[in-house]
Amino acid sequence: MEVDNPSAGPSAPVRSLAASKNGRTAGKAHKESKSAARRSYLSRASKQGFEHRKELESKRQAMKGVEKEMKEEKEAEQERKRTAIKERRERQEEKQRLELVKAKMSAKKLQRMKKRQGRTKKING
């Protein structure tokens, strides 16, 4: 009579037990140590190092700052031109108003002078 011996026949491959990183922990000796995940599905830009990304971001921010400054200067120049035009128009309007007032006053003064001249004996005779 033959007895089946489990160790005598073909058997499943046996994994070696690795000690855990923090020493022996119950029930964890069969676990493999974890490693960083491979990010092959990510784009090349995402795989770049933090320092490199930080440098690129700082350059981008500097460029944005320069663009913003140029835009502000342009707007300030346009505002200065607008105010200059507005002031010039106001001065012209004031000048025209004063000329009209002056012409009106001159006409009245001329009328008064003619009236006075008419009162003298030399002119009336």
Image: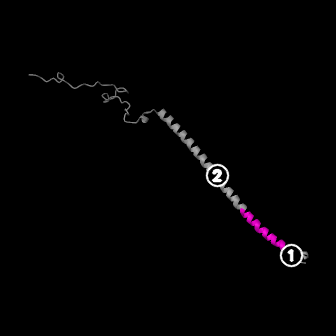
Does residue 20 appear to the left or right of 49 in the view shown?
Answer: left
| Residue type of the residue flagged with mark 2 | Lys
Disc marking residue 3: none
For image coordinates 78% across by 70% down, the residue present is 107
The residue positioned farthest toward the bottom in the image shown: 125
The residue positioned farthest toward the left in the image shown: 1
For image coordinates 56% across by 43% down, the residue present is 67
- Distance, label 2 to label 1, CA atoms, is 55 Å
In the image, 25 versus 49, the foreground residue is: 49
On the image, the x and y values in percent for residue 122 come to 91, 75
Local secondary structure at mark 1? helix
Does residue 12 appear to the left or right of 87 in the view shown?
Answer: left
On the image, the x and y values in percent for residue 65 come to 56, 42
Label 1, residues with CA under 10 Å away: few <14, some 14-19, many ≥20: few
Residue 103 belongs to the span the image colors magenta: yes
Specify the quadrant of the image occupied by residue 17. Answer: top left
Q: Are marks 2 and 1 in contact (CB under 8 Å)?
A: no
Q: What residue range appears in magenta?
A: 96-115
In the image, 103 versus 34, the foreground residue is: 103
Please tell me whether residue 60 is drawn above or below residue 4 in the rendered image. below
